[in-house]
Every structure is written in C-alpha cells, then in structure tokens.
Amino acid sequence: MVNDRLSKARERLNAYYEAELAVLSGQSYTIGSRSLTRANLSEIRNTIKELEKQVRELETVASGGGHRRAFRIIPRDL
C-alpha cells in the first residue's frame, strides 16, 4: 500500500515538474490589452514542494524508518 502511494506521488511530482517547465516556456498570452495565463506558477511550485515532502516521507516509511517518539511518564500514587 505504501509503495502504491509512493509511486502515485512520484508520478504526480513528475507531472508537476513538466507543468512547471511548460509554464516557464510560455503559457501566457497577450492579445491587445488582455493577458491570459493558463497556469499559476506559484501554485505549481507550492504543490511541488508539498509533493517532494510527501515523497520523502513515504520513502522513509517504505524503507522501514519512521518517526521515533519519546514519551515521558510520571508515576503517581492515587
């Protein structure tokens, strides 16, 4: 299940990399005084950052790692 999520996240990340390149190569048009941009570069870049983080986390889980948590327990007499 983790490997499926990881492969899908990688596919999405690659698609967003391609979208970023498409926007950088000219996805905006100007006709007269009107300007149209087909995609928002800042949204694409924010999503890339989120997907890169998600891929790193899924790779950590898939490799058997994970978050280690320490808990402090205070014994009490009731």
Image: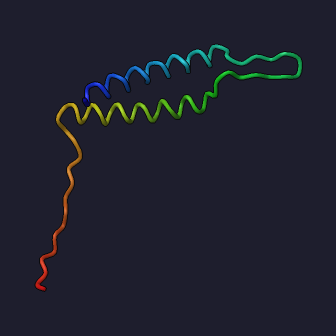
Q: In the rendered image, which quarter contains the N terminus?
A: top left
State whether residue 12 is above or below residue 68.
above
Q: How many marks?
A: 0
Residue at 25 percent of width and 35 percent of height: 60
Residue 32 spot, x, y in % from top left = 88, 17
Q: Quadrant of the C terminus?
A: bottom left
The image shows residue 23 at horizontal and vertical percentages of: 62, 19
Q: Is residue 68 above or below residue 27?
A: below
Q: Residue at x 43, y 24 (%)?
A: 13
Q: What residue sits 37% from the left and 23% below the top? A: 10
Extreme-right residue of the structure: 32
Q: Position of residue 72 (x, y in %)?
A: 18, 67
Q: Does 41 sit left or right of 12 as displayed?
A: right
Is 13 situated left or right of 66 in this image? right
Location of residue 14 by image quarter: top left
Q: Is residue 56 above or below residue 28?
A: below
Colour scheme shown? rainbow
Rendered position, 30 above or below 42:
above
User: Can you tell which quarter of the image residue 4 is in?
Assistant: top left
Name which residue lies at 16% across and 75% down: 74
Residue 44 drawn at (x, y percent) = 55, 28
- As drawn, the residue found furthest toward the front would be 1
Residue 6, by quadrant, is: top left
